[in-house]
Amino acid sequence: MSKIKIFGLGGLNENGKNMYIVEVDDNIFVFDAGLKYPTMGMLGVDYIIPKFDYLINNKKRIKGIFISHGHDGNYGALVDILKELPDVNVYATKFTMNLIKEELQKEKVEVKANILKEIRPHAKIDVDGYTIFPISVTHSMPETVMYVLYTNDGAICYATDFVFDSTMLGRQVDRVARDQSRRGFEDVGIEVLHTV
């Protein structure tokens, strides 16, 4: 049986600053890396990010940072993180990856091009013997995905912000996600569903 730990470095009981860690044995998977904006009483503070010393101290164990969508609360801390962890792979859909690249360029942070991994919803990602499956969900931001991390002991789902809205334009991603997730989970039981 795998040793699995799930915890947040941010995003718990707050709006924004989403960053969740899933450890499977000695492997660390990071889901989202967001910031939050200060309240009016926090003069001189531009933004707040999760305290990510844990990631710095365990950088060799990190398999990737998986970004769900392009809201600041989900990807806004990446620039600061990549300054400290320039070799960590970042996974995101095309729209979200373009926002990430734009932010890196604006802040003049250079990273190796091969660490920025563009993904497609409903196309599995193989990461060092693990499969991660991004599933489209409906949200106010285009190309939002949830992630399913398959382990030997079951599937762990990270479901970020999403809505059930049949009036959204374009294909019915909620229906597609439900159908795909049923097919994807046939052989592996869902052990944990984490939604923020």
Image (cartoon, grey):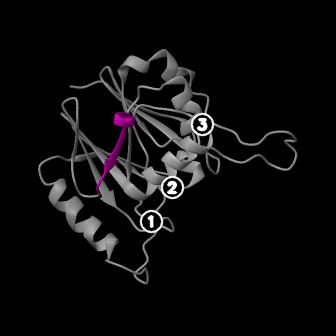
Give the answer, above or below, for where 182 lies relative to 21: below
| Residue 96 part of the magenta-drawn span | no
Asked if residue 77 lies left or right of residue 144, the reply is right
Amino acid at pointer 1? Pro
The reply to whether discs 3 and 1 touch (Cβ–Cβ < 8 Å) is: no
User: Residue 22's spot in the image, x, y percent?
Assistant: 39, 33
Q: Nearer the viewer, residue 47 or 116?
A: 116
Asked if residue 65 lies left or right of residue 130, the reply is right
**Chain part drawn in magenta:** 113-120
Q: Residue at x 53, y 46 (%)?
A: 75
Sequence-first tag of 1 and 2: 2
Asked if residue 38 lies left or right of residue 122, the reply is right
Q: Nearer the viewer, residue 136 or 44?
A: 44
Q: Residue at x 47, y 26 (%)?
A: 86
Residue picked out by circle 2: 70
Sequence-first tag of 3 and 1: 3
Residue picked out by circle 1: 142
The reply to whether discs 1 and 2 touch (Cβ–Cβ < 8 Å) is: yes
Q: Residue furthest left?
A: 187
User: Residue 123's spot in the image, x, y percent?
Assistant: 22, 53
Q: Is residue 34 visible in this depiction of the protein?
A: no
Asked if residue 52 lies left or right of residue 68, the reply is right
Residue picked out by circle 3: 108
> How far apart are labels 1 and 2 at the CA level?
8 Å
Amino acid at pointer 3? Lys
**Secondary structure found at label 3:** loop
